[in-house]
Amino acid sequence: MKKSVLYLFMAAASLFLCTGCKKQEPLPAQSPAPSSVISLTVWGGEDDEALLAEIFSSFQSNYADQATFQIHYQPQSESSCKDALLANLEEGADVFAFADDQVAALAAAGALEPIENQETIRAANLSASVEAASVDNTLYAYPLTADNGYFLYYNKAYFSENDIQSLNRMVEIAAEREKLVTMDWTSAWYVYAFFGNTGLEVGLNADGITNYCTWNQTDSPIRGIDVARAMLEISSSPGFASKTDTEFLAGVQDGTVIAGVSGAWNGIAIEKAWGKNMGAAKLPTYNCKNQQLQMASFSGCKLIGVNAYSKNKDWAVKLAEWISNERNQTLRFEQRGQGPSNISAANSPAVQESPAITALLAQSEFSQLQRVGGKFWDPVTAFATSMAEQNPSGTSLQEQLDRMVEGVTAR
């Protein structure tokens, strides 16, 4: 037994020595394998899942020699991101998409910290989107889109260029054709359209939390009651219906809706339904106190934020920058029809030729950044729902306006 072991040892040694006599070829150079696994959670809109999966894949490929990534996508509405994040900040997403009206509250709560490379981001993006992502001229998030507004979609088979100048005329035509023009009066975001260019005001107080509102004013050239009557006139027509954005799109697709107020995010689906008959334009005027008033709009941007409490903050910053860079904003436009905030992407021929983006730019003259506190939404929705349903309670219009303003300005 001992001899066998000895023979084996000698044979192995001889093989080693013999091999050592040969000239050895150098081993091919190899990149060191990434030693760390970076876990990141990303919140984004439900409709963005496929787009974000593609963006995550390119991010992982770009940084494959530096780390291995586990990127977890979770659907989260941009409009309610703030509430979800602040409910458990330390366990919230590392990177998240949100509407720009939440940036001040997120910064005040410590969820966002100032962006480090501010001048680079400012130079790359449209000034309006930079303003929307800033608090007191300090940038707290990465601009992602510059299209978070609304305008008019219409079917050219039913309306002329002259027809679309007046909402009341469009509603008449829809009634004659037994079709519908729609707008979402269950959303205070859209209802601002009727009050925004009247001289009546709404906005944030200096505390950044509470609102001021004069929508019930009785001694102005256009009074709140004049707007309420105008809304009742529109909703009394069988050619108008208050429908949510989802219901509007379903009506476009089944042929019952021939015009409506919505945003760029529906452009691709509407073009698929209407084809060459798809039209897009600024919002029309509406009849109020025997004059035509231009409808206003809230404008805004989608932003990408990085959680100040992220356990992998450096990588979260890199991912936020990647999601919002020129290449991926262009990809977002191609796949989702959303208007880029990046200057180079926004100036591309494809974006400039988009009917939806062109309409949004035309409406921008009559829009303002959405800057209202949380108490704005429910009272306005309650008032507008009553107008959409033709005031079923019979309560005086002034009383409903007063109740709405009391709720909006509540502390």
Image (spheres, rainbow, N blue to C red):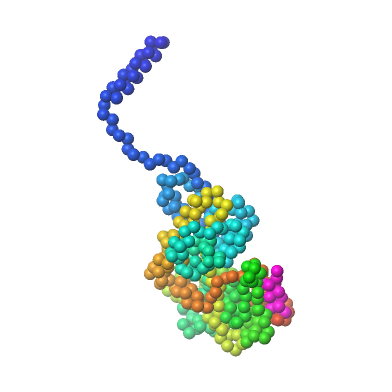
300 relative to 73, above or below:
below
The vertical placement of 272 against 45, above or below, is: below
Q: Residue at x 62, y 85 (%)?
A: 222
Q: Quadrant of residue 287?
A: bottom right
In this picture, residue 49 sits left or right of residue 106 = left
Q: Nearer the viewer, residue 320 or 391?
A: 320
Vertical arrangement, residue 331 with respect to residue 65, above or below:
below
Q: Main secondary structure of the magenta part?
A: helix
Residue 399 on image: x %, y %: 72, 79
Region of the chain picked out in magenta, as a range = 399-411
Q: Name the image quarter holding the N terminus.
A: top left
For the point 57% across and 63% down, the residue is 103
Q: Nearer the viewer, residue 288 or 21?
A: 21
Q: Is residue 28 one of those drawn in magenta?
A: no
- Residue 328 horizontal/vertical position (percent): 44, 59
Q: Residue at x 48, y 42 (%)?
A: 36
Q: Position of residue 337 (x, y in %)?
A: 46, 66
From the top left corner, tell me how far across and down residue 130 is, in percent: 49, 66
Q: In the figure, residue 308 lies in which quadrant? A: bottom right
Residue located at (42% from left, 41% from top): 33
Q: Is residue 320 visible?
A: yes
